[in-house]
Amino acid sequence: MTPTLKTVLARGTIALRVNELGAAISEHYKGESFKDAPLIMLCVLKGAFIFFADLVRAVSIEPEVDFVRLASYGNQALRKERILFAKDMELPVADRHVLVVDDIVDTGHSMHYLLKVLAMRGAKSLKVCALVDKRERREVEVIVDFPGFVFPSGFVVGYGLDYAERYRHLPAVYELVNSQ
């Protein structure tokens, strides 16, 4: 089977939404209660890097940025995998506001784990921003505070999202459809 790419989010649609998210995030973090602890925007690698770069440029506040990469090991079919840091962040989060930026929140297992670790490290507040929020597939409680787009189903690629490390470079988001 040869996969077909069906456009689900055009480049302009994404750019418009990123600017809206940037404005909403800036508005949320500009208040007095955030002046004592500057915001850290934390990019979850690899998938979020393009979205993250555009989002950081779209905020009107001055965040610090950091990166983390998670890896799952084990039998995913049985949901007993262990989630580990393949790359840990470098900035301390104790008494800091942290906005985690991810490409997609699906079942929620990885995000739940990351938020738990950040809370244990003493983050003052934690929020999540995701390009794609697949709420219908959630298996654990995770709230995406700043969702880009809500998708019920479909395997999407492009704009950082990949399939076997392919398609990240595409400027829009596409559904990967199997065709014969």
Image (spheres, helix red, strand yellow):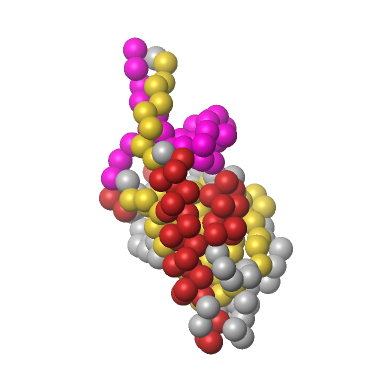
Residue at 55% of width from left, 29% of height from top? 166
Query: In terms of depth relative to the viewer, which is nearer, 147 or 30?
Result: 30
Pinpoint residue 88: horizontal percent, then vertical percent: 66, 58
- Up-down: is 40 above or below 16? below
Residue lying farthest to the right in this orientation: 90
- Is residue 117 in sight in this rendering? no
Tell whether position 6 is magenta: no
Q: Is residue 141 left or right of residue 125?
A: left
Q: In which quadrant of the rendered image does the C terminus lie?
A: top left
The residue under the point 41% across, 26% down is 5
Q: How far across and how far down the image is residue 92, in percent?
A: 68, 71
Relative to 68, say whether 143 is above or below. Answer: below
Quadrant of the rendering where the N terminus is positioned: top left
- Magenta region's main secondary structure? loop
Residue 97 image position (x, y, % from top left): 56, 75
Answer above or below: position of 72 versus 169. below
Residue 7 x, y percent position in the rendering: 38, 32
6 or 116, nearer to the observer = 6
State the count of labels.
0
Given residues 76 and 143, the one toward you in this image is 143
Give the residue displayed 44% in from the left and 43% down from the top: 12
For image coordinates 40% across by 65% down, the residue present is: 145
- Asked if the magenta segment contains residue 164, the reply would be yes
Magenta part of the chain: 152-180
Q: Answer with left or right where residue 126 lies relative to residue 136.
A: right
